Amino acid sequence: MSEQATPWSDEFLLGYGPMDDIHHEFVELVHAMQVVGDEVFPALLDRFAAHAEHHFAEEAAWMSAGNFPARDCHIEEHEKVMASVREVQQMVAAGNIEVGRRLAVALEEWFPGHATYMDSALAQWMVKRSTGGVPLVLKRAVTT
């Protein structure tokens, strides 16, 4: 990975620890795909794909175990992302690194909205099931 700081921000915290941890890794990998050298990009894309498969399967398991109401549309969105990742993996394997870089940018743009609207509802659902309340999330102030 690059020695630059990753773009993780407390703004991404949702208050469900296991989800916050997996999201942190997601953000770091997406950032790394934008800054690593071309020679290591294909392996990093494969690492990201494995992470995303695990990440999305974990969220699907949480949704299924808790009868989460918005389960189907949430899982469908994950499936569409994974279809794109698999398609790009094939193009990168054929030598088109640039399309992989564009995927990383698209993922960086997609993630905040997905986390804010879909994952935050799941995080609240999970916390409510385990504690009877909603998550309390303390976020550090952003400094520029």
Image (cartoon, rainbow, N blue to C red):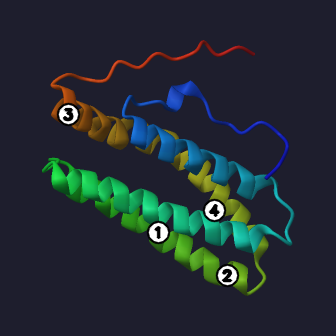
The alpha-carbon separation of the residues under discs 3 and 2 comes to 43 Å
Q: In the image, is 35 to the left or to the right of 137? A: right
Reading the image, the residue beneath label 1 is: 82
The alpha-carbon separation of the residues under discs 2 and 4 comes to 11 Å
Give the mark nearest the N terminus, 2 or 4.
2
Residue 130, placed above or below residue 136: below
Q: In the image, is 67 to the left or to the right of 7? A: left
Residue 46 is tagged as none
Q: In front: mark 4 or mark 3?
A: 3
| Foreground of the two, 65 or 111 | 65
Q: In front: mark 1 or mark 3?
A: 3
Label 2–label 1 contact, CB within 8 A:
no
Residue type highlighted by circle 3: Ser
Residue type highlighted by circle 4: Leu
Residue type highlighted by circle 1: Met
The answer to which quarter of the image holds residue 56 is bottom left
Say which residue appears at 33% left-offset and 43% top-offset.
118
The alpha-carbon separation of the residues under discs 1 and 3 comes to 29 Å
Helix, strand or loop at label 4? It is helix
Label 2–label 4 contact, CB within 8 A:
no
Reading the image, the residue beneath label 2 is: 91
Residue 64: image location, x then y, percent: 19, 57
Say which residue appears at 31% left-offset and 23% top-offset.
135
Helix, strand or loop at label 2? It is helix
Residue 130 is tagged as 3
